[in-house]
Image (cartoon, rainbow, N blue to C red):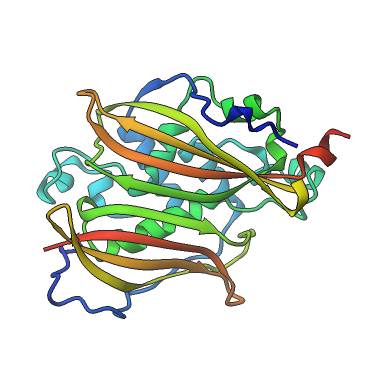
Amino acid sequence: MATIPKFDQVKVGDALPPLVLPAISRHQLALYCGGSGDHNPIHVDIDFAKKFGFKDVFAHGMLSMAFLGRLVTSWAPQKQIRGLGTRFTSITWVGDVITVSGKVTGKREANGEKLIDLEVKCTNQNGQDTLQGTATVAAA
Amino acid sequence: MLDKKHIGHAFKAFTTTVEAGKIRLFCKAIGEDDPIYVDEAAAKAAGYRAIPAPPTFLTAVTNDDPDKGGLLRLLNVDIGLILHGEQHYEYLAPVHVGDRITCQQKVVDMYDKKGGALWFVVSETELKDQAGKLVAKAKGITVVRNPDAAKK
């Protein structure tokens, strides 16, 4: 279980332990369709995806954002997270192997809390970023 | 092109309950295996009053709209033409199993790029708990691919 990061011990540039995920499967997209309530057929129905010009179904952006959430909650307890945001910069296809990584980009105090700013991202097996995001964690 | 008159549109608010079974399925889908998301005793031992909703489970909360698809109907856009551009969450208080969350979504901006080939629709959603306390704010950018070409 993650422990609350100590503000004085965290340094700008510190890397979070990365997550290397299993290849994205059609089964995972089906589970996420049901689990998230995002029922857009473009993620699970190849006929529908092709009709709209895509070669295959592709992962929900929010599935990858959930991976960013996993990275942060593996580093700090969830109740310490104050913000999580991302740009979806490229499509994640079935079979892609995603690595989730992050690093400390800043430390500041606001609203009476000691905050740590993180850069977090998902990168595919070709080294291309699929998500480029940020997170803010309250430290002790 | 899309009509910017929709900026400011407020969707009908709805209320949904955070359910343990939904969080369990969500965690299975995303590969999250921390016991705090499935076992109430583990959650309490970790300092939560009940099983917490994982950070991006809020998308499942906002997707539980009984009038789902309201943004697409408002814009008259087919679901096959949209992509997710950005998503941001601000967490103001924890959300747990059993909470009754009321979601209020508004369109806050619309703009185009590449001569109208791509439209960006920015919406913000406030999430309040059963006591009326603001627990989170969500901001999403929906990208609409070439809405004009699709209507020809």
Question: Can residue B31 be seen in the rendering of this structure?
Answer: no
Q: Nearer the viewer, residue B24 or B87?
A: B87
Residue that appears at 64% across and 53% down: A58
Residue that appears at 23% across and 79% down: A11
Q: Nearer the viewer, residue B116 or B59?
A: B116
Tell me the quarter of the picture where residue B142 sits.
Answer: top right
Location of the C terminus of chain B by quadrant is: top right
| A6 relative to A40 in the view: left or right | left
Question: Can residue B26 be seen in the rendering of this structure?
Answer: yes
Across and down, in percent, residue A111 comes to 16, 52
Residue that appears at 32% across and 61% down: A72
Tag count: 0
Q: Nearer the viewer, residue A140 or A74?
A: A140
Across and down, in percent, residue B123 comes to 50, 37
Residue that appears at 33% across and 67% down: A118
Position of B46 relative to A9 (above/below): above
Across and down, in percent, residue B77 comes to 71, 32
Name of the residue lying farthest toward the right: B152
Position of A126 relative to B79 (above/below): below
Location of the N terminus of chain B by quadrant is: top right
| A133 relative to A107 in the view: left or right | right
| A105 relative to A124 in the view: left or right | left
